[in-house]
Each structure stands twice: as structure tokens, then as C-alpha cells.
Image (cartoon, helix red, strand yellow):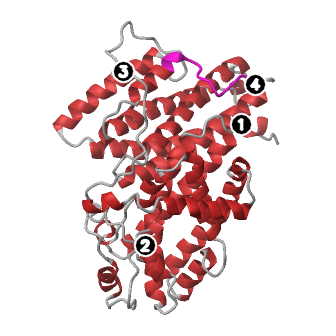
Amino acid sequence: MTLPPLAGLASYHQAAHVGFDVEANVQRFWRYAWFEKRLMDLAMYWLASTPEWEAKEALGLHAHLDALHVAALRERVSEMRNPAPRMDVSPDEAIDRFFEELLTAKDTLEKIVAVYDVLRPALLEAYRAHYANSNPVADYPTRYMLRHLIVDHEEIDEWGQQAVQAIVATPEDRARAQAWQEHLTQYLLAAGGIAGLDEKPAELPEPRSTGTFSPDYYPRRDERFAMRWNFTNPQRQVSLNEAVPLDERTLALMCRRIVEMDVPEYMTRIIAESQNEPWEYYVEMTRQLWDEVRHAMLGTIYFESRGVDWKKQIAIHPGMAIRLHSLGVHEAHNVLYAIEQNLMPANQGKRLEYEISRNANDPLAAFIQDYDWADEVLHVHIGRKWLLPKLDMKPQEAVKRGWELRATTADVLTDLERNGEQKNWWPELVRDVLGRETAVTSFDLTRL
């Protein structure tokens, strides 16, 4: 009896293939990590200001995956070279010129085409080629890493191609998308492509970029969101009102989940403007950002399952993001920290929210609240780990300061209220979803 050799990784003939050596790996990984890092940056710059909800969802997930990919690439380099080369600097000025052009994207069409029809497909192709040319035994750790990166990017690419088809809808769109794709492809080729080995064009198109890029973090919703300028916020008081039936309190909790998109909309600036942090910071902060996106997604899943037109019937506005953008980065993070800490007490926090939905005999809502609670426990630790050392405060002092800072932003939305009717939308939602009148007899419509 002859057992298969080499742990089933390859035949002896295949394993005798001389693949990339260590130095070739390191040089490519440096480039790959920089492309992934800059993709994460793009998501931080674009998530809030891109009005389409579905784009926000994808950018939140893909940013966290990019951060994880950078961490994996950095770790692999550190295993192969000691001391490891610097991974926090650009490996090629031509890559930076490519991103300067990419950042001139004018609208969602150009953003989607740039990332999902130019850059990410090229990155996926480079990973596949690298995997194919890596020795399956000598370089097994690289193959293991790349296999997981490829799986992530294949899933991203599936979404991206569907997004391109959806947003490039007219002949005019197609002409504009093709011109933009060709423009960026030339600049990517000028950097030698992802691996730096592609033939470079003799000439480049006239650059669009004319100066320093300034990110736009202002949160936006598209026209499908009928009450995007209605800053009334009845759902929190309803969910905490013990005189209200459990099914109505649960409905309020699901509304609270769906509006959580405003958290990643202000977290993007916190992350993007926090320079020179350990890479673990970006991994954990983008994880929290993605969790908050996911909570909003869970809210949409709940209302979709009940046939509710949530874009029209719920005031899904970016009010808190707008307010916190008026603060400095550490101040905004301090407010987030205070909010997260406030979610832990059992009498008003995540345990209570879970028990409300469970006692309402609503399995989907209870399932959502169970995972929401689990995520928030992690977020509390992330805040303690990364913010408290910067504040040099005791935890309770930081919580107190966070609520004080939040209060200073109370009037930020005043001028924006004229953009939409400030009405109490809750009674109508209860009638439509629960088939009865709300049990709430009076409302405090103080915004947020």
C-alpha cells in the first residue's frame, strides 16, 4: 500500500517546480498590501458621501476585508524577512498617481467602475497568477494565505460585476464608463499593473487630478429615502417604554437597528484621519464599522421579511453623523465610546433589548438582537483599547466627557430641518405593520 505523498499538496513532479523565491514574494506582497490599504482608504473616503445604501453596505464589508488582507500580507512578510521592510510607505510613486486619478471619481458610477471594474479585478487576477506560480510545499504558507484572499476577492468581484451592470444602465452611461475605465487602466499599467511587471504605456492620458485630494465625509441618502431630512427619533423612547406592548417595542428596536448606518458614516472619518496607528487599530476599527453596517442590514432584513417599505416609512437619516462631523476626530470617537458604554447596563442596554424581542415571541428580532448584543460587547473593548490611552482618563470620566461633547452638537441640525418635514412617523408605521394604533399616548419628539 502506497499512501499519497507530500500530505496531498502536490505530486513530486509538481513540487519540483521552482516558484517565486522569497525576495520575489516580499516585493509583490509589499505592492499587494499597499493596493489593499488604499482600497480601505477609498471606502473610508466614500462610504458616507455615496448616497446609495447598497454601496454603503458593500464598502463597509470590503473595507474590513481589505484591512484583514493587509494584516495577512504584513504577517507573511515578517515571517520571510528579518528585519521586515517597511510596509507603511508606498512601493511606487506610479501607484500613487493611479490613486490620485481614481480619487477624482465624480459620482457613484465612476466610483463603482473604478474599484469594481478596474482595480479589484486586476488585483484578483494578480492573486490567482501568484498562487499558480507558488511552490505548493516550500511556499505553502503563501498559498494558504492567497487562497483565502482569492475567496474573498471572488465574492467581492461577484458583487462588483453585478453593481457595474446595475449602474451602467444607458448608452450614455456605457460610453462614460468605458472612457473612465480606459483612462484608469492606462494609469494602472503605468505602475506596471498590480505586480509591477506589466508593459508600461509610452504616453498617459491627460491627468484629471490637479491638486491635493480633500475627502468628503458628509453623509448622504438618495431620493428613495423619503424622510432622510426628518430628524425626529421616536423609536428609542418607544422601545424603553414599559407601558407599551412588547410587539411595538420590538418594532421600535428594529427601527433602531436600521438607522445604525449613521455610525459607520461618522466612523469613516475617525479611521481615515487616525494616521500612523498600529495596523491592528485599522483591523479592529473597520471590524466595528462593518458590524454597525451589518446591524443596519439586519434591520433591513427584518422589514423586508415583513413586506415593509422601510425607505419610505422610517426616518432613516444621517443626523448623528452630521452632528459628530462637527467635532474633532478624538472628540467624535469619545462620543461613540460613551454611547457604547451606555449599552452595557442590563436595565437599559443590549440585554434588555434582547429580552424584549425574545419575550415578544419574535424569533427573527430576537436573533438579530442576540448578535447585536454580542457585537456591542466587542465594541466596548475596542473603545477601551484604542481611545482611552489617547484621552488619559478613567473610563467613567471618558463616558461623562463623551455625553458632554454630544450635547454641544445639539443645534447642528437646526438649519437642516427646513429640508424636510419634521413629523412623527411612528403612529403610521404601527398602523401599517401591526394593524392597530400605537400604545404611546405622548411623544417627546426631541431629535436624536
- Give the residue type at disc 1: Leu
Badges 2 and 3: C-beta atoms under 8 Å apart? no
- Give the residue type at disc 4: Ala
4 or 2: mark nearer the eye: 2
Res. 99 image quadrant: top left
Q: Which residue does the numbered mark 4 point to in the structure image?
A: 84
Q: Nearer the viewer, residue 409 or 118?
A: 409
Label whose residue precedes the other's in the sequence (3 or 4) = 4
Q: Which residue does the numbered mark 1 point to in the structure image?
A: 9
- Residue 115 seen by the camera: yes
Label whose residue precedes the other's in the sequence (4 or 2) = 4
Majority secondary structure of magenta residues: loop
- Give the residue type at disc 3: Thr
| Residue pictured at 62% horizontal, 23% vertical | 28
**Is 118 left, or right, of 4 in this rendering?**
left
- The mark total stands at 4
| Residue pictured at 66% horizontal, 18% vertical | 24
3 or 1: mark nearer the eye: 3
The quadrant of the rendering that contains the N terminus is: top right
Instruction: For mark 1, give the secondary structure.
Output: loop
Tell me residue 412's x, y (percent). 40, 57
4 or 1: mark nearer the eye: 4
Which label number is shown at residue 210? 3
- Give the residue type at disc 2: Cys
